[in-house]
Amino acid sequence: MQERPSDKDKEVLTVEEIAEDLRVSEGTVRRWIRSGKLPAFGLGQYRIRRADYEKFLDKYRTGQID
């Protein structure tokens, strides 16, 4: 039986929310997305799954992302 996604897995964030949370520019967040460091989806406006954002933060905190 396949597990159902949790609410956390379904929650999405915007570039603006992440930029505000990390106190960086929206351009920085978009660069991370374009470079593949931060997974995102969407056309025109990116959306980032909270679970992907938290994985990104873990890598960022441990110095695995510049």
Image (cartoon, rainbow, N blue to C red):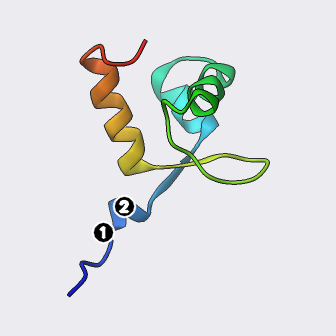
Question: In the rendered structure, which amino acid carries the disc numbered 1?
Answer: Ser
Count of residue discs: 2
Mark 2 surroundings: few (<14), some (14-19) or many (≥20) residues within 10 A: few
Circle 2 — which element? helix
> Mark 1–mark 2 contact, CB under 8 Å?
yes
Q: Residue furthest bottom?
A: 1
Q: CA distance from mark 1 to mark 2?
A: 5 Å
Question: In the rendered structure, which amino acid carries the disc numbered 2?
Answer: Asp
Quarter residue 27 falls in: top right
Residue 66 x %, y %: 43, 11
Q: Dot 1 corresponds to which residue?
A: 6
In the depicted structure, whether residue 6 falls above or below residue 61:
below
Q: Residue at x 29, y 78 (%)?
A: 4
Q: Residue at x 54, y 33 (%)?
A: 36
* Of 8 and 63, the residue lying toward us: 63
Is 55 positioned to the left or the right of 32 in the image? left
In the depicted structure, whether residue 1 falls above or below residue 61:
below
**Res 9 label:** 2
Q: Residue at x 30, y 26 (%)?
A: 59
Residue 43 x %, y %: 75, 53
Is 34 positioned to the left or the right of 18 in the image? right
Q: Residue at x 59, y 27 (%)?
A: 35
Quarter residue 64 falls in: top left
Residue 34 x %, y %: 64, 31
